[in-house]
Amino acid sequence: MDFSLYFDLPLWFRLVLQGTIVILVLFPLAAACSMAERKISAWIQGRPGPNRTIPPFLAWIPGINIIRNLGLFQLAADGGKFTFKEDPVPGNVNKFYFILAPILSMIPALSTISFVPFGAYFTTLADGTKHLVPIMLARTDLGLLAVFAVSSLGVYSLILAGWASNSKYPFLGGVRASAQLISYELSMTLSILPVFLWVNAPGGEGTLSLFDVVQTQSQPGFLGGMWYIFLMPVSAFVFLVALFAETNRQPFDMPESESDLVGGFHTEYGAFKWSLFFVAEYAHMIVGSGIFCLLFLGGWNPLPWVSLGSFINLAAGVLPCVASPLFMGVIGITFFLLKVGFFIFFFMWVRWTLPRFRYDQVMNLGWKKLLPISIANLIFYAVAIAVKDLCFPNL
Amino acid sequence: MSDTLFHLFAVLTVACALGVVLNKNAVASALCLLVCLTGIAGLFVLLDAFLLAVLTVFVYAGAVVALFLFIIMLLDMQGGNRKPFTKSSIVAGAAAAGLLCTGLYSFLVRGHIESPVLATTKVGGSSLRAYAELLFTTYLLPVQIVGFLLLIAMLGVIVLSKKFENLEDIK
């Protein structure tokens, strides 16, 4: 296929186009998660979930019941409601910050995705060798650090919403959010350090890039092809727990906590502004699941010890067209999205299974359990990797 | 392009720094500080010091200002009335401002940078390593001393804030 027309466009235009396309995928995906949440919660609780909504003028189409039973029209109705219903601003709020908060919640949620690679394809260099290129918006060596930096700004929308609402429950939600998110950021960052100790073997280039993490999980050999969830289960577990806390998902949704704070930081919000918080939470979840998959589940590699490259080579024996960069990219993204999808399911599964923690339990877990565990884990892997490099350099 | 961006970020940084000082509302001040730090991170990016930019956002904008806000909200500070200036504070303030202006002036007139600053080396692949190596070799002592100071500060906070009920037990 000829893409020269596209590559003739000016660079800034292409970048804007790429960013817009990614957001246009992420935003509806985050909205669709709300429907998935309803359906999965219904399934876990033995209910059918939303299955009645349908526009009357579409009801005559045969077979449309399948879409109706999936609740897709309910999703459309929800979207329409959030957009068009009256959006009252309570009288005693600090108006500027009250309106700023939901807007602010979207910025980190949608911009972290630019550092996340979601697939890879082979390009053939001039000398004929094949070279794996990631599909991502901003390729930087600081990959994960940049994601953490931008996503750490997400807490301000919660704090601001709680503070600007100028009433008691949102205020408590905002205070809780600021304390909780900082507490779990520590164990989150410490838990993934062993991964980068392993990736940055002595003598290699120093990198924090998520693409390189996936690359080191796609090497030949027993250790080379191993996903890090098998190599570093404790890291994966601590990271996952901290991810739940950072995305404010149950059992860690202290800032929201309906049972004791009414609605927490978004008690005073309604309609479109509220839906922005909602979509931001799901977008954080999607990006967080994506990072977990890249770090611990081999990213776009289909199976442990089977890298995308070898899978494509295998499949190209049956279907030669698979080897083209376009197909390979699509296949890589599909594998990646399947894993992310599973993790979004996992998030919901946990939410509808475990009861919410008390606030003191959240703080105890974060500071007295997860943090010591992640520090011990880091020391263990630092020693283990040093011993491995000294005694078995060829492993 | 980068000139325009520099002016944009510089104006943003200075304006927000002024906002931190002049705002009566403590929360608004903290938010100005947040935007100010983000502007500084932008300036670092323009200098190709990506690591510094990311760390500024991560540590200062992401965590420190959030803690400020947490404290402000926890203590429920209302800003309140400022104490009027006294004669001595006016004199001290003027002297400090004069010293600062002199310092800035001499820096602008005489200051020159001998060698490429470490901060401006590109963080591409191996120079992330260069940062780490310098931290563990040339700058090991300063890093250790700063770490020790932070440890002392932390211990001080614990001693000051914790209520020791049975002092006999500790002794």
Image: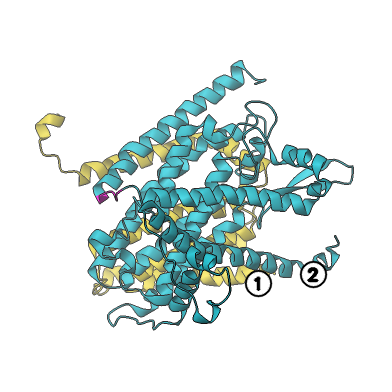
Q: Is residue A358 magenta?
A: yes
Of the pair B62 and A347, the residue shown nearer to us: A347
The colour applied to the residues of chain B in this rendering is yellow
Q: How many marks?
A: 2
* Mark 1 and mark 2 on one chain: no
Q: Which residue is mark 1?
A: B4
Stretch of the chain drawn in magenta: A355-359
Q: Amino acid at mark 2?
A: Leu
- Secondary structure beneath disc 1? helix
Q: Position of residue B37 (x, y in %)?
A: 48, 61
Is residue B26 visible to the viewer in this orientation of the structure? no
Image quadrant occupied by the N terminus of chain A: bottom right
Quadrant assignment, res B128: top right
Is residue A80 visible to the viewer in this orientation of the structure? yes
Q: Is residue B77 magenta?
A: no
Label 2 resides on the chain identified as A
View extreme (right): residue: A127
Q: Position of residue B99 (x, y in %)?
A: 44, 63
Query: Going by the image, does A97 lie left or right of A295?
Result: left
At label 2, counting other C-alpha atoms closer than 10 Å, the crowd grade (few under 14, some 14-19, many 20 or more) is: few
Task: Classify A51 as above or below A223.
Answer: below
The colour applied to the residues of chain A in this rendering is cyan
Query: Going by the image, does A27 lie left or right of A9?
Result: left
Query: Going by the image, does A252 lie left or right of A336?
Result: left
Q: Which residue is mark 2?
A: A9
